[in-house]
Amino acid sequence: MPADPTDHAFIDASFRAGPNADRRLQTLVEISHDVVYRVRLVPELVIEYMGGAVEKLTGYPPEAFYADANVALRSVHPDDLHKLVLTPDAAHEKPATVIYRWVHRDGRVSWAEHYRLPVFDAAGNVVGIEGLGRDITARIEGEQRLRESEEQLRQLAGRLLRLLHESAGLVVLRALGRAQPRHVDTRQHARRVRNA
């Protein structure tokens, strides 16, 4: 009986097997919507691998990062540079998941959520990081639009409430047979009604 192509054990074994396994993995990374990276931290900062959607997110091809690791530093929004892991100590101190902004080569700003893990040498020392970055710009912009919409609704509700108070004050004044002022202090009129 032929193997079930939906069987995960079969898929895993066939993916790892054979001379093209590395190429298949490379293809998966390159068609991914995520940025996949490996950075050596010691003895100096070197981008060892940058793949996936890196050019879409930054505007730079992977080769630009390999040629100059500072391309990554220049591509991260200046206000977010403190979130980067640039030393072995930082790999222990900084959170594994972080959100920061990338400044695209054309100037637009994109948001990315990064999942990063330290890479250890045989002695257990941190020598680098590996990570995955996902473009979350649409989510961040959607959250911003939602906050703006909520604020507009709060302002509208406040205006409606003031209008209702003014209208209630006018009704009270009409009932008392008094003139209609343009702006009504409903608390003052409520005291007058109680005292009348």
Image: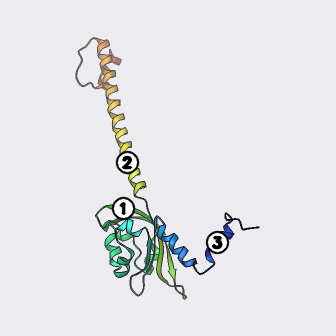
Q: Nearer the viewer, residue 129 or 188?
A: 129
- Which residue lies most toward the top here? 177
The residue carrying mark 3 is 12
Mark 2 touches mark 3? (CB < 8 Å): no
**Labelled pair 1, 2 in contact (Cβ < 8 Å):** no
- Image-quadrant location for residue 157: top left
> How far is mark 2 from mark 3, CA to CA?
42 Å
> Residue at the right extreme?
1
Question: What element does badge 2 sit on?
Answer: helix
Which one is closest to the eye, mark 1 or mark 3?
A: 3
Q: Compared to 71, does 134 lie above or below?
A: above
Disc number lying in front (1 or 2): 1
The amino acid marked with disc number 3 is: Asp
Dot 3, crowdedness within 10 Å: few (<14), some or many (≥20)? Answer: few
Q: Is residue 136 above or below residue 177?
A: below
Nearest to N terminus: mark 1 or mark 3? 3
Q: Is residue 10 above or below residue 166?
A: below
Residue, x 30% and y 12% (percent of image)?
A: 176
* Lower position in the chain sequence, tag 2 or tag 3: 3
The residue type indicated by label 2 comes to Arg
* Residue annotated with mark 1: 110
Q: Position of residue 196 (x, y in %)?
A: 32, 14
Which residue in the protein does label 2 denote? 145
